[in-house]
Image: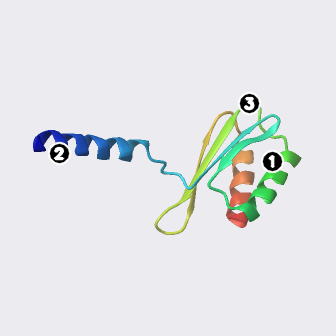
Amino acid sequence: MWPRLAVLAIMGFIAWRLLRSRWAFTIVVDNTGVRSHTGIKTPQQCHLLSLFQRTRFVDGRVTIRGRTDENGQLQLTFIGPIDDATKQQVRNFLVNEL
């Protein structure tokens, strides 16, 4: 009985570690603007939404994920068709706003 519970607990811990979000926020943008966003505080949401509504810079669906590391530096990951200049523009905006 106890070995089964121990194995089940270990499997649950491994699943939790694999499935939990490692990102502080996620933004999904497409040609029409922001499709979804999680982890962003309400005051910054208005600025973020207005930036992505003003500038149509993606061709397709782009996911932006971010977090701060141990040194307080913002780390971003971009998934989708987005050029380097646009990545830098988004990075600068997020550094100033978040």
Horizontally, residue 53 falls left or right of residue 42, namely right
| Pair 3/2: label in front | 2
Q: x, y percentage for residue 65? A: 59, 48
Q: At label 1, which amino acid type do we have? A: Phe
Q: Earlier in the sequence, mark 2 or mark 1?
A: 2
* Circle 1 crowding by C-alpha within 10 Å: few under 14, some 14–19, many from 20: some
Question: Distance between the Cα atoms at labels 1 and 3?
Answer: 13 Å
> What's the CA distance linking mark 2 and mark 1?
48 Å
Q: Earlier in the sequence, mark 1 or mark 3?
A: 1
Give the crowd class for mark 3: few <14, some 14-19, many >=20 residues within 10 Å: few
Circle 3 sits in a helix, a strand or a loop, which is it? loop
Q: CA distance from mark 3 to mark 2?
A: 46 Å
**Residue at the disc numbered 2:** 6
Can you tell which of label 2 and label 1 is closer to the viewer? 2
Residue drawn at x 81%, y 47% as measured from the top left:
52
Q: Is residue 13 left or right of residue 93?
A: left
What residue did someone put label 1 on?
52
Name the residue at 74% across, 46% down: 86
What residue is shown with label 3? 60
**Which residue is the extreme one toward the bottom?**
71
Three-letter amino acid code at disc 3? Gly
